[in-house]
Image (tube, rainbow, N blue to C red):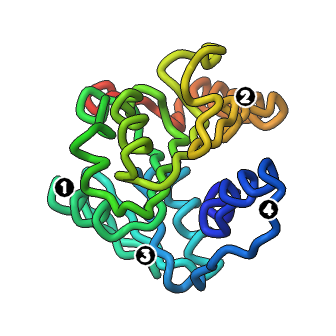
């Protein structure tokens, strides 16, 4: 949803609505829009394949090199810099670890296009919020669409609330459905009691 909103310049149209302006804004074909997914776990892979499937040029980045059909995958620090430099839309789906905390900061935003949109669906701790605000105010990047924050609920006096270049969501990207979640828990309990492998194990050495 946010990728389509970013591509179709939804924030620009919302601002036009507030100003009673009727004007079509330029629109780039999807094939000419580069969308990058940072984090190629279960959610990242599904997101990347979905976005690629509707016609966007899709890139993926992970700590370790991965291979996915129709998606160019990069890894490591050099890969991250390259992916940020190319991207029109950057979607963060990384796990929050010691390595990724504060990953999106002044230096990171300066590597992005001035026309880029940053979408954070992972954790607020990935972002230095003061640096993001500065990047938006100075035109370093174009827009931010945020579902997670350092403090939740987002304080009522936070600058993000009324910033014309920011879209706010109340941490809804992956709301847990009790029906499906309880089925996963039950399956794991059954597997454990049978002595079978248990799914979704946290690797403490990787911090996720």
20 lies above or below 198: below
Element under disc 2: helix
Q: Earlier in the sequence, mark 2 or mark 1?
A: 1
Please name the residue that numbered disc 3 is placed on.
71
- How many badges with numbers are in the image? 4
**Sequence order check, earlier mark of 1 and 4:** 4
Gap in angstroms between the C-alphas marked 3 and 2: 34 Å
Tell me which residue sits at (31%, 48%) in the image: 109
Q: Residue at x 51, y 42 (%)?
A: 120
Q: CA distance from mark 4 to mark 3?
A: 38 Å
The residue under label 4 is 21
Left or right, 190 with reference to 69:
right
Q: Quadrant of residue 153?
A: top right
The residue to which callout 2 is attached is 186
Q: Nearer the viewer, residue 174 or 55?
A: 55
Closer to the chain start, of discs 2 and 4, is 4
Q: Quadrant where the N terminus lies? A: bottom right
- According to the image, label 1 marks what residue? 76
Residue in front for this viewpoint, 62 or 20: 20
Q: Report whether residue 208 is seen.
A: no
């Amino acid at each position: 949803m946010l990728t389509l909103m970013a591509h179709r310049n939804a924030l620009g149209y919302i601002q036009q609505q507030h100003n009673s302006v009727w004007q079509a804004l330029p629109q780039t074909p999807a094939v000419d829009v580069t969308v990058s997914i940072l984090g190629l776990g279960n959610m990242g892979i599904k997101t990347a394949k979905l976005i690629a499937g509707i016609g966007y040029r899709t890139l993926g980045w992970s700590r370790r090199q991965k291979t996915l059909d129709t998606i160019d995958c990069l890894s490591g620090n050099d890969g991250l810099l390259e992916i940020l430099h190319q991207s029109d839309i950057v979607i963060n789906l990384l796990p929050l670890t010691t390595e990724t905390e504060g990953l999106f900061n002044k230096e990171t935003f300066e590597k992005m296009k001035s026309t880029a949109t940053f979408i954070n669906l992972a954790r607020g701790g990935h972002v230095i919020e003061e640096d993001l605000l500065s990047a938006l105010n100075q035109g370093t990047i174009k827009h931010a669409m945020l579902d997670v924050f350092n403090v939740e609920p987002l304080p009522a006096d936070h600058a993000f609330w009324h910033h014309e270049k920011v879209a706010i969501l109340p941490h809804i990207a992956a709301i847990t459905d009790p029906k499906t979640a309880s089925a996963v828990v039950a399956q794991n309990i059954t597997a454990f009691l049978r002595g079978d492998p248990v799914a979704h194990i946290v690797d403490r050495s990787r911090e996720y």
